[in-house]
Image (cartoon, coloured by chain):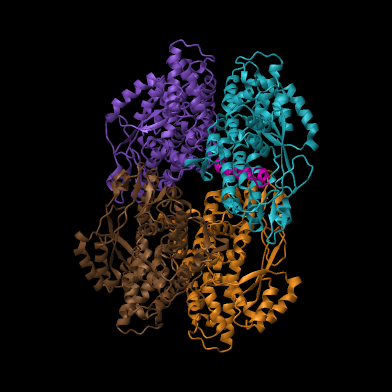
Chain colours: A purple, B cyan, C brown, D orange
Amino acid sequence: MAYSEEKLLEEKVFKDPVHRYVHVRDRVIWDLIGTKEFQRLRRIKQLGTTYLTFHGAEHSRFNHSLGVYEIVRRIVDDVFEGRSGWSHDERLLSLCAALLHDLGHGPFSHSFEKVFQLDHEYFTQAIILGDTEVNAVLRKVGDDFPKKVAEVIAKTYQNKLVISLISSQIDADRMDYLQRDAYFTGVSYGHFDMERILRVMRPREDQVVIKKSGMHAVEDYIMSRYQMYWQVYFHPVTRSAEVILTKILHRAKALHEEFYSFKSYPIHFYSMFEDEVTLEDYLKLDESVILYYFQMWQEEDDPILRDLCRRFMNRNLFKYAEFEPAKEYKKLGELANLFQKAGMDPDYYLVVDSSSDLPYDFYRPGEEEERLPIQLLMKNGDIRELSRESEIVDAISGKRRTDHKLYYPLDLICDDSSKKNIKKQIRKLLDIEE
Amino acid sequence: MAYSEEKLLEEKVFKDPVHRYVHVRDRVIWDLIGTKEFQRLRRIKQLGTTYLTFHGAEHSRFNHSLGVYEIVRRIVDDVFEGRSGWSHDERLLSLCAALLHDLGHGPFSHSFEKVFQLDHEYFTQAIILGDTEVNAVLRKVGDDFPKKVAEVIAKTYQNKLVISLISSQIDADRMDYLQRDAYFTGVSYGHFDMERILRVMRPREDQVVIKKSGMHAVEDYIMSRYQMYWQVYFHPVTRSAEVILTKILHRAKALHEEFYSFKSYPIHFYSMFEDEVTLEDYLKLDESVILYYFQMWQEEDDPILRDLCRRFMNRNLFKYAEFEPAKEYKKLGELANLFQKAGMDPDYYLVVDSSSDLPYDFYRPGEEEERLPIQLLMKNGDIRELSRESEIVDAISGKRRTDHKLYYPLDLICDDSSKKNIKKQIRKLLDIEE
Amino acid sequence: MAYSEEKLLEEKVFKDPVHRYVHVRDRVIWDLIGTKEFQRLRRIKQLGTTYLTFHGAEHSRFNHSLGVYEIVRRIVDDVFEGRSGWSHDERLLSLCAALLHDLGHGPFSHSFEKVFQLDHEYFTQAIILGDTEVNAVLRKVGDDFPKKVAEVIAKTYQNKLVISLISSQIDADRMDYLQRDAYFTGVSYGHFDMERILRVMRPREDQVVIKKSGMHAVEDYIMSRYQMYWQVYFHPVTRSAEVILTKILHRAKALHEEFYSFKSYPIHFYSMFEDEVTLEDYLKLDESVILYYFQMWQEEDDPILRDLCRRFMNRNLFKYAEFEPAKEYKKLGELANLFQKAGMDPDYYLVVDSSSDLPYDFYRPGEEEERLPIQLLMKNGDIRELSRESEIVDAISGKRRTDHKLYYPLDLICDDSSKKNIKKQIRKLLDIEE
Amino acid sequence: MAYSEEKLLEEKVFKDPVHRYVHVRDRVIWDLIGTKEFQRLRRIKQLGTTYLTFHGAEHSRFNHSLGVYEIVRRIVDDVFEGRSGWSHDERLLSLCAALLHDLGHGPFSHSFEKVFQLDHEYFTQAIILGDTEVNAVLRKVGDDFPKKVAEVIAKTYQNKLVISLISSQIDADRMDYLQRDAYFTGVSYGHFDMERILRVMRPREDQVVIKKSGMHAVEDYIMSRYQMYWQVYFHPVTRSAEVILTKILHRAKALHEEFYSFKSYPIHFYSMFEDEVTLEDYLKLDESVILYYFQMWQEEDDPILRDLCRRFMNRNLFKYAEFEPAKEYKKLGELANLFQKAGMDPDYYLVVDSSSDLPYDFYRPGEEEERLPIQLLMKNGDIRELSRESEIVDAISGKRRTDHKLYYPLDLICDDSSKKNIKKQIRKLLDIEE
């Protein structure tokens, strides 16, 4: 029997708190899950620093990847199979792409990518196409199979319908993470009737469409997403931890560039500092490695690196104030000056952080991040873009919301053992009550 | 105002997926949560290697500790407060002991304690009484307060009622972990009506008792516990990971004793290898540190250490067979011989592991691990031990159940590239189908 | 001890699927629940004919009334008690008004009120103030206590804060029914974080306000409400059952006016037919009485009454088509003509039904149904109306959505045993596929 | 196409709070649901008088019947289809029998059957085989199809495997009602991992068997059942309502036999009083009819009937005391005497009620109510009865638990306006505190 068609003697199930069970019957999927590159995702948290705000959010990308796979499996096996517009030949490809779509994520991706100019999508491709266990499994399906999987994830595959399963405004990726992150954080947002949405999905040439009768379930999903963004993903305490993490990385890189002599030299960081990260180096990174260094660096001589690492490890985070860049840039300048005078390097201790989200967007061709809009399948067979049918979605569609905050170390600012007067000025500017 | 009475200006809440919210109003509690020793619990998983079986079980002891605190808080504030038999003076002590009861746990406690003869209860005491941030907070309440907290956890405190809140057969510890572990693994066991149990708890001189009207909820709790033990805690796949972990530690220690030269020397392990672990050393240990070394050791020269670490990191675990020690010790001897001949050191590759549990026990004074039985408060004021009232509990009471399994590396045994005939004999003995 | 202060020896709890437990400690509340007027609410469904669409929706107004009481109890006891702006003296009044706010509802209120010009609010007042067991209990609290309870429910009480607990756009009434109706129907809408909302409610002179920090939970609540209206409350199948029910009542009244001789004379209906319903008559009505008559009337001689009753009892409902009154009134006229010719009285068999809702409204003084807007309490103490802070709410605020449908008996129209050609014309006009 | 194979153009779904959705694709099932005999189940509560104890328990047998159908559908379509031992030809038969298994239940079955010697199983057969809409639908499948459905429900069908789907100790009937009744009452018992149990069910010649790997889920199910029986089904308050209901029926019958002249003559009861109930009469009975009479009888002249009806309608129930028949029969005699003297007819006002359950039973051939034991399918293909493998089940297996209670009207006994001394004696005997 062809490897691509091989079934396990007995279906394997993973107990999953979100989908109850994740079902695996294909040997290819089972083998992929067993690769070391996929197992590595167990050591990378799905939500980065969010566990410092919501203590339940300790779940890994391994969890989420299984979930996305399971959702796509249900769509193709329970809904699409046998319908016109869907080719059974795309089944295994869809499952593999779903399972592997986040494979290239590194530890605390967001911060690492920003500081070291890494790109997890690049590494996802590299793992799938490079000399890895994952690649070996995929090649057994066919010589060009790794390339096809990589293309689906890169959104360049010719069959756009397959891409839309994991990359659209209502894809398996989003449906899994909203529910999963809600479950582990314990917030009451993030619930929507996924079972109904799956039942009303239909394959069309270019993308998955949603039968009109399921519109309200989709509205509910979009509102869930909106709430999760502002209540969880952009939570200011999480962003504070993110700010500190980013500053640790910046500081370590700066020290490296100044030929600072680390007590415990971060060999795992070397290639990142030098901007020449190989796939092999990258695969060695996970959150236990990073936390190992952060723990060691709590004893470094450099006071900034030491302080920031202690803050991160012991959750002694920065506080924040609302900040309006357009109006308050002058105040920011003054504050930077005062911080400098008070002995707190403003590059590390006075940080503006911005979050921004589009809850839903209709199609804007040519824009940087083209996002497939949600298309409704009307009773008469017509296709209509969601915001043209739903008042609620229309009301929030295309409206970008942005939030800026200024982060600073309240404890240092209130420590009057030195620079008392300057700190008093700082407190006044920041409206901190005496 | 006395520090012990100080309240936060505004109650702090932690969103908790199990109890919805954890409420903190006492400054002492807030300050304890902020200590670095308590924050360290975020880097130690509640269920050790269980996440390799149930992928959702990635939650930390930090989670659980907050949960136990919250349950005790509800008991003392919502149920006991104002009732005769309960002294408000024990309130803060109870809350602190609940929060800190697991403080001394190290990474993968079970295996580490076994191999290096450590004792997490000793370290809990040491952290509370030693030169730590936790101790500093507790001392602000009163000079003898740390000692009292330590005594409650050590079960030597004179007020047995307080002890029973966190150490009995129906304490806040168990009520939290059953529910929490069920939530994160996603299994459907572990549910019982805690709200009802809390409502029928009453303070008595020696221990918490349960009003008879709540007996059925208690039965349900005991059945939950039974199921969780055999479905989750003693799951053979988890035990397989535990076996490998233990063998890694054994191997590293043996190599150290043989003056093996590690490529990356495990400084964090040094004092454990030498049996002289200080509190300072101990507090540096967490699961990211351990996983860092395991990752590095995947490249060590020693083939056993290297192989075991790769197995653990990539979840390539041992398989298992049922094993009855009394009947099969001879077969075990034969197998050990054959393993040796096949080049697989039986000390590391052929392991018997046993699990054993008492679902509920009435009181057996003088036995090693005295466990307070559950006492019912009858309508007429009498106290009766649970198993004398409940048929179901009586049926399972005092019946120890034990399970033995034999673990081995199926992949090596099936790899016929060498020692083909010996391996064939092994497979035959182990009943492995060709 | 004053009756108003009397507590039960032991708190009584009702197991409630929505709030887990409903707690009763006040003797007044316990006695009110025991009255026959309150027990009557067990025989009136919360959602009228909705059970014919969502089979789980068989819950009664008794359920809901306990739930509203429990929410108000939590607000006043757990959140308001001890805060400035709240007087403990209003506690019992608030609890009683919450419990009794729906007391005057009759069977299938909506249809009965429309056909017989009854008003459940009038009867709520009448029961509270009349010669009833409820009144007797309330009078034991104080001579003017019944009047005060009635005033709160009638929204004329001088303390507007008390009124707002059960009559505003985020009152205990709505919070209970959204969750309860979602629970019993099984839909996945209707969830919001009520615990959070309760925690951020604050008493102000005129009404309950919500701390700004809880705004997102309120947004979620408003979206829940919106979804519940369109997914559940206005479901076209429910409305179809409602249409038939209304027509049954119309027919029975018309027959009475024509001196039709009923086989089983509906004594319970007499005073309604004659527009002279006394309190005593009214209290005898419940849904078992109504269904008793509908069952009997399945055997009446009048073909319309008989047919409609059979339809209702056996759920053989009307089908529906979208309908736009402004554009299609001419078509409606034609259809009415054809129905007449085909022997189907259009007064009973061709019905336009409209549903309309405002998901949220800011204050419009002087309008017919003034609804208190939701006010946010800002950090600086200011009060701001919700839609001025929340983009999402602003987007849907004040936008009335209306939906019209045309109901007709598809089975009769497709029955070609008579009037074949006329029915063919009808089917064509209604776009019914042959 | 044969009617038995006919599929709906579009699958119909019922939103179900327990199973999320009930799926219907077969026209036969759809048509059966639409019959008036099946719709009648909407007017019969699943749990009779339980709603007077657990106010959420207002759900109907209609609900439950759909649920049993859905579980059987999942077993045969998702688990059995294609497996050896299962014939696709039995599919539709199994679905119909599941849907219709409770069709013959009348209002408050338990009491009615006892008083009037009715048997709901007889009426289920009668409806399926008689001149009904249900029969007409079934006959369209085949002339002998109604008979086959009736046989499955009567447990006389030759294929015992089909019978075991709805009549064994782990059948779809029990699995639905445990979960459903737990959901609607809101109790925390009644949960077990049904999805797992379904996945491990296997068809065998004589009955469904359960793979050994699912044993713990089955243990959990049996414990759920045990808890539901004692916490919900046998709740003493429910039994009190049942006692009153039974006594109302007894009284009405007695009055009829004495030629008492009812103010409102109960025509619906006539044939029951005369022990000659026809199918036509029977189908007219539902709970609204019964409650209609009870409401009317609140105004009857007979003081016993009037009082009992008022008690039932207004939930003014009897109180209860523990009672041991073997020891206390003498006391019962004394009490009866005193009741007589005090003017309270002991036939109606002093009632012993017993409940009794076997949580699980192994097979006892020849006994009155043979219940199929649960059989486990071992890894090696052997079949073993559950209690031989499970310690927990063994512990409770075959142990009948019985509970006796004595019910009486506390209010009358405490009303000292007459027969003061006798009542004092009664109170003393009943241990009622003064």
* Image-based side of B277 in relation to C109, left or right: right
The residue range painted magenta reads B161-186
Quadrant hosting residue D361 = bottom right
Q: Is residue C182 visible?
A: yes
Marks counted in the figure total 0
| Residue A334 is a magenta residue | no
Q: Position of residue C84 (x, y in %)?
A: 41, 51
User: Measuring 38% from the left and 22% from the top, which residue is drawn there?
Assistant: A339
As drawn, B314 above or below B195: above
Q: Which quadrant would the C terminus of chain B be assigned to in this image?
A: top right
As drawn, D220 above or below A43: below
Q: Position of residue C361 (x, y in %)?
A: 29, 53
Q: Position of residue B100 (x, y in %)?
A: 61, 36
Q: Position of residue D201 (x, y in %)?
A: 60, 50
Q: Magenta stretch: dominant SS?
A: helix
* Image-based side of A290 in relation to A424, left or right: right
Quadrant hosting residue D428 = bottom right
* Image-based side of B92 in relation to D402, left or right: left
* Image-based side of D56 in relation to A243, left or right: right
Quadrant hosting residue D311 = bottom right
As drawn, B147 above or below C337: above
Residue nearest the viewer, comparing A312 with D177: A312
Residue that sits furthest to the front in the current view: B1
As drawn, D38 above or below B256: below
| Residue B170 is a magenta residue | yes
Q: Is residue D207 visible?
A: no
